[in-house]
Image (cartoon, rainbow, N blue to C red):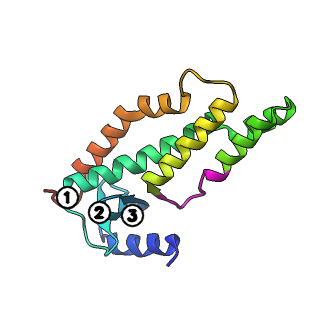
Amino acid sequence: MALADDLERIAAAAAAPDDRVTGVLAAELLDSGRVYLCSFESGAWLALGDDARPVTSRARVHAAASLAALCEVAEESAGGGALPELRRRLRELGLEDADAAAAALETTLREPPRVATNAYLDALGSAARRLEQALGDERGSPFANALQQALPAVEELAAHLVERHRVPLD
């Protein structure tokens, strides 16, 4: 079954007569499988497992929300957030190695819908670092710094999702 079909199935399972589902994100946790994070018009959230049943583990909901948010930040930060423009400039400057690294990063980025996974996050980080090194940045990683700076917001989002979860969590 394609991810788009899974998202439709989960959105239908999450549907509530008094509130409209506005989005569904998918995260694949290493130790406990796929979690779908459903947002509602009211601001409420509901995490469902692959079996379309509510997730009741606070830790699992928090981990899925954190992973989904980190993947979003990673995608937005990859290549400075403007990869096509960066590639155009690299070609103009004749920086073939850097353009090849940027092309590899562009290939690593997945079009939505996609599943947030640790492997995807790692792949983005590796491709971003190769681009940074091809550009001569040996001191630090702007990509890693962006993720580090986003951690408080990621934690706030995950806590908000747990707080606004429609089903009690243990």
Q: Earlier in the sequence, mark 1 or mark 3?
A: 3
In the picture, measured across the screen, residue 107 lies left or right of residue 41, that is right
What residue is shown at x 63% (from left), y 24% (from top)?
137
Mark 1 and mark 2: span between their CA atoms? 11 Å
Q: Position of residue 3 (x, y in %)?
A: 50, 70
| Numbered mark located on residue 132 in the image | none
Disc 3 residue type? Answer: Val
Mark 1 and mark 3: span between their CA atoms? 21 Å
What residue is shown at x 34% (from left), y 54% (from top)?
64
Q: Quadrant of the C terminus?
A: bottom left
Q: Which residue is mark 3?
A: 21
- Secondary structure predominantly adopted by residues drawn in magenta: loop
Q: Position of residue 41 (x, y in %)?
A: 37, 57
* Residue 16 counted in the magenta span: no
Disc 1 residue type? Answer: Ser
Q: Which residue is mark 1?
A: 57
Q: Is residue 129 visible?
A: yes
Callout in the foreground (3, 2): 2
In the picture, measured across the screen, residue 44 lies left or right of residue 71, that is left
